[in-house]
Image (cartoon, helix red, strand yellow):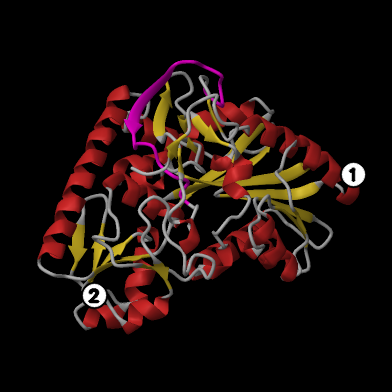
Amino acid sequence: MSGNVLENNRDVNYIHRETCRICGSKQLYKFLELGPTPLANSFLREDQLKGKEDYYPLDMYFCRKCHLVQLSDIVNPEVMFKDYPYITGTSKPMQKHFFGLAKEVIHEFNIDKNDLIVDIGSNDGTLLQNFSNHGISTLGVEPASNISKLAEQKGISTINRFFNEECAKEIRNEFGPAKAITATNVFAHADDLNGILHGVDALLSDDGIFVVEVPYLLNLLINVEFDTVYHEHLSYFSLHPLIWLFHNYRMDIVNVKQIPVHGGSLRIFIKRAKSIISSSSNIFLQQEKNYNIDSLATYDNFSKNVKSVKYELVELLRKLKGKGKIISGYGATAKGNTLLNYCKIGPGILDYISDTTPFKQGRYTPGMHIPVVSENEFHANPPDYALLLAWNYAKDILIKEREYQSKGGRFIMPIPEPHIIWELISGE
């Protein structure tokens, strides 16, 4: 393996913590090692291919006290997010998702034009645009400078920094309290969860709502979604540790629902204590209890399943390649880079990976150095098989690429059990 494995205390860009980031316990149980891995979104230019890449440990731990599943090896966020390639607005499923979220928040919590909505990790402003379209005041907080500029170009006011208590107080002093604060697929990215909660506490109005969306641990375990593990995703939440966390700030989960994005997520509504609480939390807590979410055996079994997926997927791809088949990847996703690096799938197996994100096109995947091309290449020179790295959008992709399939092209689903998708599905 080329590149540098950065050791603890030898590089300011990487630290290893010994305690749980929610409860502070040292009772951490390591159950999965995915190996030293480059940052999942560190796509390379051609002139960078001969240089050394930095690799960081990618290991999963379970806290025996509060049940948080987490990474303990933490890469400096300034390194991960300084030149971020993920752009929400390029994904039609996410556009639709955020339209629905904004509609729900506006109607369920009586948001009007006099209110302020703040989005933590606001990316290119796709979510906030849905609030802005209703005449509601919005403000984004986005640490990636290249992405925050895209939001500003859309007319979405965005602060280019990380959200914390200091940032929150400055926002409140200038704009007043926020009636709603959203954090979609970003809460799990933060090592300092307490810093975020201090900020939310400082900024949220007394009757305000804090809305969090996080990938759900139960879906990860059941569907063997190990590729959703990468250095940006520091925490993998079940409901139990979140209740623990919010109680520390005199906040309660007033409602929770399951949503399909990112392989299965939770949408959680949090208000200050003494609010009316639905029974939805109890349903999820019972579900977690039934699955033995607190048992070490559950995580050991998950680790065994991950190794099985690796073996079966590599065998399938090698057999197809041995028959002279052309195979590409579909979707240059961060999760795909975890899978490719763990399974050691490189350009000898995948000729290229197609993706809709302009920033990624013309670059190479971290670690495995597979070229990333546009959709046009996929359609102009279709492969015999396409490894569905963006499996979380499988239904939308299968509908979109019906012509490719009708001409004999086939997709390969990597998880929970690697298999070729033979059937065509219909859609709107």
328 left or right, relative to 249: left
| Residue situated in front as seen by the camera: 323 or 400 | 323
Q: Position of residue 381 (x, y in %)?
A: 30, 81
Quarter placement of the C terminus: bottom left
In terms of secondary structure, where does tag 2 sit? loop
Q: Residue at x 48, y 41 (%)?
A: 231
Q: In the current view of this chain or complex, which residue is farthest to the top?
A: 26
What segment carries the magenta color? 20-40
Q: Earlier in the sequence, mark 1 or mark 2?
A: 1
User: Quarter-wise, where is residue 321 in the image?
Assistant: bottom left
Q: Position of residue 39 (x, y in %)?
A: 47, 46
Q: Main secondary structure of the magenta part?
A: loop
Q: Residue at x 21, y 74 (%)?
A: 384
User: Quarter-wise, where is residue 336 in the image?
Assistant: bottom left
Q: Position of residue 34 (x, y in %)?
A: 34, 37
Q: Amino acid at mark 2?
A: Leu
Q: Amino acid at mark 1?
A: Asn
96 left or right, relative to 387: right
In terms of secondary structure, where does tag 1 sit? helix
Name the residue that disc number 1 marks: 173
Q: Residue at x 29, y 83 (%)?
A: 403
Crowding near the residue tagged with mark 2, few <14, some 14–19, many ≥20 C-alpha atoms within 10 Å: some
* Looking at the image, residue 149 lies above or below residue 10: below
- Residue 72 forms part of the magenta stretch: no
Q: Rounded to the nearest whole Å, what is the CA distance between mark 1 and mark 2?
A: 55 Å
* Looking at the image, residue 88 lies above or below residue 192: below
* Looking at the image, residue 360 lies above or below residue 238: below
Name the residue that disc number 2 marks: 424
Crowding near the residue tagged with mark 1, few <14, some 14–19, many ≥20 C-alpha atoms within 10 Å: few
- Residue 26 forms part of the magenta stretch: yes
